[in-house]
Amino acid sequence: MFLGFLQLFRPLNLLLGALAIVISSSILEVEVPFIILQTVFVVIILNAAANAFNDYMDSETDKINRPDRPIPKGAISKMTALIAAILLFVAGITLSAFLNSDAFIIASLIAVPLMIAYSLWFKGWPLFGNIVVALILGLTFIFAGAAFGNLWGLIVPALLAFGFTLLRELVKDIADLEGDRSAGLRTFPVLAGEKKSAILAIILSAMIGAGALIPYFLEFYGLKYLIILIFGIEFPLFYVLLTLVKSPTITNCKRIAQILKACIIVGLLAVYLG
């Protein structure tokens, strides 16, 4: 049961979220450990809740796309996942109320409703569902800025996270094409096909690669930002472009999705060190 819950909550994603908050606190030079820890807990709890609720809603499609997930393989029941999600949502919102009013509003009135609405309705909407997921991840940094008393202090990492997540979600949809089609979901790859979806992903990759350079040319960040950006983001994006052009297979798309997740953390480090 414990291992089932651990898999349900996606611990790697939770650790990445925690790392994002810690790095964000360093970027904003926050010197109150309790506030940092509290913000980390809110992000971890709400993301765990969203992951559990998403698995609850995706239990049928996961039988095809991800049969190793805890619900399809019988490690966790659907009802258990739902109860866990509800309890965690309530706990995360409650804890956010002890930060400040801006953080509480973002968590309770924007982030959590988007998380729930995505799994209930938006997941199968072509592109819009992908945009919602990207917004949720971008909001992580806006929430951190609010919690640390600087609402817009993390706008650059928020925009980078939005762009990379949008691209990653599109690539994941290409990888999940077979299962989503069987489940009747109307994702962009289901409607437009693998080739057109790959073309859109290529365009997004090029836009993100160019957009990530803008903060350097506007002198928001220095040479360290540019160096980390080139080796940690631009080169991986170039690999993504080549792979999508040559062979946008399901296996390759799954690998690309993992690369793009790592790029988000590299982008944070670029902002922090730049």
Image: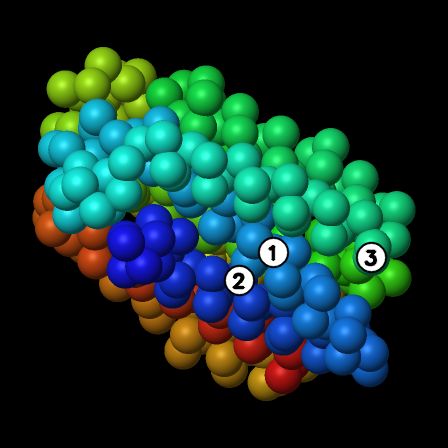
Which image quadrant for residue 153? bottom right
Residue under numbered circle 1: 43
Which residue is at a point 46% across and 35% down the rendered structure image?
83
Relative placement, left or right, of 122 versus 162 is left
Q: Which quadrant: the C terminus?
A: bottom right
Identify the element where label 1 is drawn: helix
* CA separation in Å, label 3 and label 2: 18 Å
- Colour option used: rainbow
Disc 3 or 1, which lies upstream in sequence? 1
Residue under numbered circle 3: 99
Identify the element where label 3 is drawn: loop
* CA separation in Å, label 3 and label 1: 12 Å
Relative placement, left or right, of 133 versus 197 is right
Identify the element where label 2 is drawn: helix
Q: Amino acid at mark 2?
A: Gly
Q: Is residue 263 above or below residue 62?
A: below
Instruction: Single out the mark in the foreground, 3 or 2.
Output: 3
Which residue is at a point 63% across and 75% down the rendered structure image?
23
Q: How many marks?
A: 3
Dot 2 and dot 1 residues touching (CB under 8 Å): yes
Where is residue 170? Give x, y as percent: 34, 38
Where is residue 230? Give x, y as percent: 45, 75
Dot 3 and dot 2 residues touching (CB under 8 Å): no
Relative placement, left or right, of 133 versus 59 is right
Q: Which quadrant: the N terminus?
A: bottom left
Report the disc number at residue 68. none
Where is residue 245? Give x, y as percent: 19, 47
Residue under numbered circle 2: 17
The residue nearer to you, when weighing 139 against 234, is: 139
Q: Is residue 179 above or below residue 268?
A: above
The residue nearer to you, when weighing 241 against 30, is: 30
Q: Amino acid at mark 1?
A: Val
